[in-house]
Amino acid sequence: MVYDSVFKRVEKKYRTTPRQRAAVEAAARDAGAMAVDAYGRTRITSLYLDTPERAMIARSVEKPLYKEKLRLRAYGEAAGAALMAAFGAGPLVRNADRPPLSDAEVEARAAAVPGGEATAVFFGVKKKFKGIVYKRRIALALPAAVAFVSGLPYERACVRWPLADAEQAAAALAPASRQIARELEAAMDRWLPLEPSMGIACDREAWGVRCALAGEPSAAGFAARDTAAARVPAAADGVAPAAAPTFDPALRLTFDDRLSYLDCHGHTSSWQPIVAPDESILEIKSAGPYPPWLVAALSAQGIYPASFTKYGNAYQRCEGTALQQAVAVS
């Protein structure tokens, strides 16, 4: 299965009501020749890594010229549960003076949820510089991801715990993936000590411009690429669609709802909401200017860009909870 490992684009977020979301979806379908991708509604779980003081996200919310985040991501309910269980089963700290977890520890963590050993996850770095988002990621088996984050060299982790899909397992050791792994190692080592910081979960519907025929240019004039297969595993907990349609990568809309967070530092012991139950976060990912129909739809509905990051908002909520707990104890 093919997945995209490198992204460079402008990404803007918008907070929408049910009425606004419905209007944008109608415009996307009727005027934009867009459709929901082959995975439909997908549960996405992300686990962000940070220092114990959360220095990475603290810097990010100050809106510097350059910022970065490190995250692991799983697609589907079961994969998300396995990801959070593996990294939450006891302390896991990457530091220069600590050895990586043993094979037995890694496998015990991956087996915390049935089937966890075979779960595929993405590990990536998201960078933003002067408004442009750059993402680089690799796919790993969950045990390999745990071992790699704890300090085991990337190649050894991939050989010891290869991905179940033979094509993906080979791609994980290809030069391009090894280069991305080197970048991830450098990013992790810039922020030592590093540990699991925050879980973020949401339901996502992704819309793309569907090309008339696979391999042909879309109506927008961009080269077609198969981006519907960019997520592994698929929404149905690892079952990929029988035939993935071809979508134009130059414009993508995602609607995220049921956003919640889990504080790995323990200030909250259960998943907590980030936005109102009826609110969605629209994210527009584009390689160029918005098409006229999209500009018109946003303007007609009074939808404007919002300064919103899921991890950033969860972090600020956790800081407020920690302060309230400190006051209550004092």
Image (cartoon, rainbow, N blue to C red):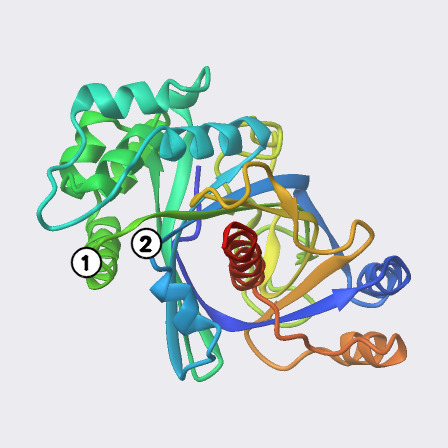
Give, as a three-letter code, the residue at label 2.
Pro
Residue reaching furthest to the front: 330
Residue 248 occupies quadrant: bottom right
Q: Measuring from the top left, give residue 126's x and y in whole percent.
A: 40, 63
Pointer 1: residues within 10 angstroms few (<14), some, or many (20+)?
some
Q: Nearer the viewer, mark 1 or mark 2?
A: 2
Number of labels in the image equals 2
Q: For the N terminus, which image quadrant?
A: top left
Give, as a three-letter code, the residue at label 1.
Asp
Q: Nearer the viewer, residue 209 or 256?
A: 256
Residue 271 occupies quadrant: top right
Counting residues from the start of the chain, the first of labels 1 and 2 encountered is: 2
Residue receiving disc 1: 189
Q: Measuring from the top left, give residue 224's x and y in whole percent.
A: 56, 59
Q: Residue at x 50, y 72 (%)?
A: 9
Q: Residue at x 19, y 51 (%)?
A: 175
Label 1, label 2: how many angstroms apart (C-alpha)? 14 Å
Pointer 2: residues within 10 angstroms few (<14), some, or many (20+)?
some
Tell me, for residue 259, which label it has, or none: none
Residue 84 occupies quadrant: top left
Disc 1 secondary structure class: helix
Residue receiving disc 2: 52
For this view, does 56 lie left or right of residue 219?
left
